[in-house]
Structures are given as structure tokens and as C-alpha cells.
Image: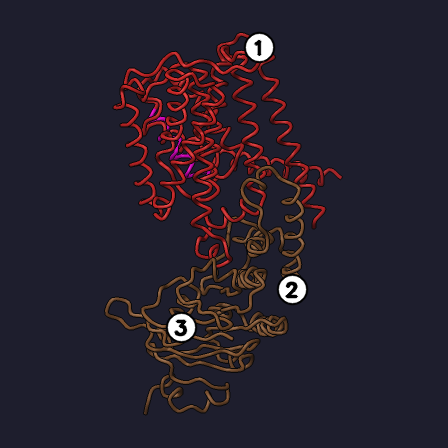
Amino acid sequence: MFKVEGITQIFGGLTALEDVSFSVAPRSITGIIGPNGAGKTTLFNIVTGLYTQTKGQVYLGGKNISFFEPEILARLGLVRTFQNVELFGQMSVLENVMVGLHTKSKSGIFSCAFKLPGQIKEEKIVRIKAQQWLEFTGLADSADVAACNLPFGKGRLLEISRAMAVEPQIILMDEPAAGLNSRETAGLAELIRKIQALGTTIILVEHDMELVMDVCESIVVLNLGKKLAHGTPREIQENKAVIAAYLGED
Amino acid sequence: MLCKIMMKEKRQILIFALFALIILLVPLFLKGNYFLNVLVFIGINTLLAVALNLLLGYAGQISLGHAAFFGLGAYVSGILTTRFPVDPWLSLLIAAACAATLAFVIGFPILKLKGHYLAMATLGFGIIMYIFFNETVDWTGGPSGLSGIPNLRLGPVIFDNDLNNYYLVWIITLGVMLLSINLSQSRIGRALRAINDSEVAARVMGVNARILKVQIFTVSAFVSAIAGSLYAHTMTFISPTSFGFNFSVELLTMIIIGGLGSIYGSFLGAAILTMLPEFLRVFRDFDIVIYGLMLILITMFMPSGLIGGLEALFKIIAGKIKWSAARNV
């Protein structure tokens, strides 16, 4: 189970998040929505260790992971994707996913430089696994392409493949549908369900309401740094406060 | 897919074997030639360029003070062998270990910095070391230098002439080049390149960027100090001017001209910048202008260095040949 408790983030005089708490059931798909500036990405940055929160705790499977560094969180099974697709542009698609398998291998500088037998064996396994993740997301055909040459939609898929290679317990996706056309978005919805079927918990920040209402089992609404509502898609759609926040009050 | 990668690997081994063969055969055609001496320096500079490329080309961390590690290697080796009865080979190892230790210790605070700040910190480090080499006169001989450094020897072979030095330097350099190529194709090489492209994403994928940067900085210093020690034992005389800021910049110019992240590019850059002064004697002090001009032109028109430019050219020619072959059918 994943839980945030009383997360508060103050930047100078600005309160970006105020006392945000919610929990997420294992293997569920949760959406975090809210108008621009609601604090969604800030929350992601705190949870994934990129920002240090002013107050509040984060738990993963009963373990307090507040203030952990991102590289430790990856080893514990928490990964994310980025709103502005952060790929390793100079590397091939396959190599990008192989970086995702970094925590699944352990050869050091010495054994890599001298190509010790253990490293060669490990390298083969990593390559095969990376290939499998590309097949999982449907990118196998582009394995040799330099990541910076990928079209945007495929770049998003690559980011997800790379994150899945970590074999996370929980994956946080920051606006995975932004910039995708409707066909690609439909493919994404299917992929998200496939990821859930592997037993992974998914949290996504998203503006595409159609996608959110389609795949999410529960939705957290943030507005001006505060949690406004938490419920099933149906409950959220009927929530008066949410409608007011999105459309403005009469 | 896997088959394709294996072919790529085989091709790489073939290229390296060819390169090594050419390097090892060159002296046969240059017996007793002055040029052999230049080639020894190209070997030492290639070693340094490869070391800096590991840091800047792979991991994307700049150093404007790498001449300091080169100098530290030279001085530790020089002092140990002239003032104490230490065997030159042992002194080489001690020198490399000293530089690595220093890099490890300063690496943790320094490599937290990014971009210009890292450049400034390494620049400062280089200058401090330069002052050290100059001012600790009792040990280093100060500005007048340290002379009488013994040559390395292996059984009956004394490395006191250009031919022997050539093989000494180049066998070590080729070894380090091979290890660096291996590294770039491995888990660690990928992690370093990932840090170079996006440190945040690399960390989120579980790459411990902080430790890895310090590790590669340490390795880079280790190799630079070996180059320094080789320099001291082949020249038998060292003075601080060889290890100043100018040389740090020259090293940087080598790898940018040759190609960031490319091991053969390091060789190309080192070769050009070592030979250039020989041809530029007519320009005297204006050689720095030529360097600057080259740097500007290369970064403008060949962002991946000469090696990248050559590759592109090769691809165009290969494409033309294929095209005309197809037309003839």
C-alpha cells in the first residue's frame, strides 16, 4: 500500500501543497487531477525524492520512505515518468531500457572495464530483458533508433518501458497522454491496464479527463494545493466542489 | 537483433585490433627518426585525453584542472625516485594511487556542483596544485624543475630511448583505450551516459549518480597520474609549466576537437594538438589563436568532433557508392 500523510510544501512564501493525505490500494490505478497550479507535479516530485517536503510523510508498503533519494526509491520499487519526457537522447532505445535495468545488475567499473565473465553473462541477460520490455510496450521495432530521433508518442512509450524495466511496485506517470493523438491515447489506456495486470500500482497525473475516467479506479482532486475530493470516477463527476473548481462557481 | 549486436561487437574488436596493429608497426618505418619522439608524446597525451574523456565525454562532468593530476603523477613519481630509493615502477603505482585518493576525497564536494560552478571549482583546484608545484621548492625544485629522474626498466630493457619509450607508452595507452571502450559498452558506461543526458532521469532509474561521478573522477585521475609518471620517467626532467592551466585547456581542446565520448577521437585530438606546434612554429606565440579558431570551427560545424565528422563523411561516401552501384544494375 502507498500512502501520503500531511504533505505540505512551502516555496518561500508560497504554499504549493497544504496537508495533503490519501492512500492508494495495491494494484489499483489512481488518477490525480486538478486545474493548473494545483500542485500535482510538486506532489510527484516530493514522492519521488526530487523535492524535500516542508512537512509530511510518504509510506510504501508500510515503510516510511519520506526524504529518500530517488535512486534508493527505485531500488525499493518506486519509479516515475516525466511530463517533458526525460530520455537519454544520445543512447539507443534499447540502451535506454537497459539503464532501467541498472538496479537488476551489479557489475562495477572494474568488471565492466575488464569484461569479466560475470559481466558478460549479466550483459546478455540485461539485453534480453530490455528487449522483452520493448516488446511489452510495442517498441521492439525501434530498438536501434537513437532515442532523440523517436517521434514524441514513441518517446512516451519508451519512458514507460524504461520505468517498467525497474520492475516497480508502483509507477507514477506525469501526464502520460499530453501531446498524444487520440489513437495513441487509446493505446496508452490499454498499456496502463496491461501494467496493472502485472501487479503494479499506478498513479497518474493527467489532464485528459476521458482517459482518467476510463482507466482510473479512484481519483484524487487537488485544487490550490489542497485535497478537494477523493473517490471513484462517478463520485468525482458528481462532486459539487470539484465542478465548482473546474468551471468556477455561479 | 542479438545477432546484429554481436556483429557490431565483432566489428569493434576488429577496428581496435587494426588500430593497435598500426600503432605497434609504425616504429618499423621510423627507425631513428625524430618523429618517433613526437609519437611518444602523442601516446602520453592520448592517455590523458582518454582519461578526461571518461569524465567529460562519458559522464558529462567538466574538469578544467586535469593537468593537476598529470602533474601530481609526475611529481610524486619524480620525488620518490630522486629523493628516495624507490623503484620507478612502484613509484608509478604510488603516484597513481595518490592522485586517485586525492580525486576521491575532493570529488565528493566538487562533483555536487554543476556546469559553470564545477568548471570553476576544478579550475581552482588546478591552480592550487600549480602553486604547490611551484612553491614547495624543497621537494619539487620549484620553477627550476626536478631533474635526474631515472628511467623505467624491465629486466635488461631500459626505457631511455625513443623506440623503447614508444612501446612502453603505447602499450599502456592501448590497454587503457581498450578498457575504456569496454566500459562504454557496459552497465557502468550506460549509467554514465545516462547521467550525461539527464541526471534526474538516471537517478530515478536507480543510478547512484553521486557515487558514480566520484568513481569515474577517481579513475580519470588515476589514469592521468599514470600518464604523468610515464612523462616524468621518459623525460627525466619535469617543471611546473607543463602542468598549468594552459595544459588543462589544451587537454579539453584535444577531446572536443577529436570528439567527446569517442576513444579514437581522443587519439585524433591528441595527435593533432601534439603535432600542430611542430607545424605552427612559424606562427610563434599566435598558436593559441589557431587553437581558438579550430575550437570555434569544430564546435560550430562538427559538434561531435572530427571523429563524428569523419564518420558522417564515410557514411555519405558509402551511401553514394551503394547508390551508384544500384543505378548500374
Q: Which chain is red?
A: B
Chain bearing mark 3: A
Q: Amino acid at mark 1?
A: Pro
- In percent of the image, x 53 and y 17: which residue is there? B166
**Exactly how many numbered labels are in the figure?**
3
Q: Amino acid at mark 2?
A: Phe
- Mark 2 neighbour class, 10 Å CA radius: few under 14, some 14 to 19, many 20 or more: some
Residue A136: numbered disc? 2
- Judging by the rendered image, the residue that carries numbered circle 3 is A40
Quarter of the image holding residue A229?
bottom left
Q: CA distance from mark 1 to mark 3?
A: 72 Å
From this view, report whether residue B48 is shown above or below residue A82.
above
Both marks 1 and 2 on one chain: no
Quarter of the image holding residue B279?
top left
Q: Which residues are magenta?
A: B288-302
Both marks 1 and 3 on one chain: no
From this view, report whether residue B226 is shown above or below residue A182.
above
User: Which shade is chain A?
Assistant: brown
Residue B186 falls inside the magenta stretch: no
- Judging by the rendered image, the residue that carries numbered circle 1 is B156
Chain bearing mark 1: B
